[in-house]
Amino acid sequence: MNSSAVHRLRLVSGPEGVSFVLLLICSVLKRTTSFDAVPVMGMVHGILFILYVVFWIQAWQVRKWDAKRGVLLFVLAVVPTGGFIAERMLGKEERGEPAPATA
């Protein structure tokens, strides 16, 4: 089932993941060199993270996910490279592929 709320969440999860990794790289460069892009990347990442949370809430309400899936998708937003995993999970959901069985 293609839900526009899930589609929006999927579309923002990849860029959110990229911005998180770039922010971490900029933080290291700020401490080790004179290069300081943290204010810019911090703003970009902050906007993408807020969009992710808004779309996450909407998708959770529309799809009526159980708590385990909803919390997992939020945790993936605060883990470096988690946005890429969330994007793959949401892509499978959009295509109607069954979720992997959990123990």
Image: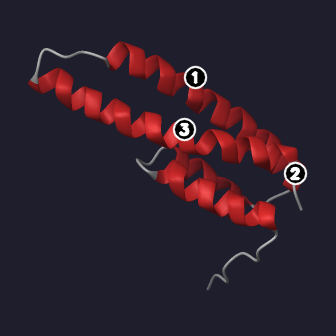
Image coordinates of residue 44 in percent, x first then y, are 49, 22
CA gap, disc 2 to disc 3? 20 Å
Name the residue located 25 percent from the left edge and 27 percent from the top edge.
27
Label disc, if present, on residue 61 of the rendered structure: none
CA gap, disc 1 to disc 3? 11 Å
Alpha-carbon neighbours of circle 3 within 10 Å: few (<14), some, or many (≥20)?
some
Q: Answer with the quarter of the image where residue 21 lies.
A: top left
- Give, as a three-letter code, the residue at label 1: Ile
Circle 3 SS class: helix
- Give, as a three-letter code, the residue at label 3: Pro
Image coordinates of residue 20 in percent, x first then y, are 42, 37
Q: Dividing the image into 4 quarters, which one contains the N terminus? A: bottom right
Alpha-carbon neighbours of circle 1 within 10 Å: few (<14), some, or many (≥20)?
few
Q: Answer with the quarter of the image where residue 42 lies.
A: top left
Image coordinates of residue 90 in percent, x first then y, are 69, 58
Circle 1 SS class: helix
Q: Is residue 81 visible?
A: yes
Position above or below: 99 against 95: below
Alpha-carbon neighbours of circle 2 within 10 Å: few (<14), some, or many (≥20)?
few
Residue in the foreground of this view, choosing between 18 and 52: 18
Question: From the viewer's perspective, is 66 left or right of 21?
Answer: right
Image coordinates of residue 97 in percent, x first then y, are 76, 74
Position above or below: 77 against 39: below
Read off the residue under disc 1. Answer: 47
Name the residue located 64 percent from the left edge and 62 percent from the top edge.
89
- Give, as a three-letter code, the residue at label 2: Ser
Read off the residue under disc 2. Answer: 3
CA gap, disc 2 to disc 1? 23 Å
Nearer the observer: mark 1 or 3; the answer is 3
Label disc, if present, on residue 15 of the rendered structure: 3
Circle 2 SS class: loop
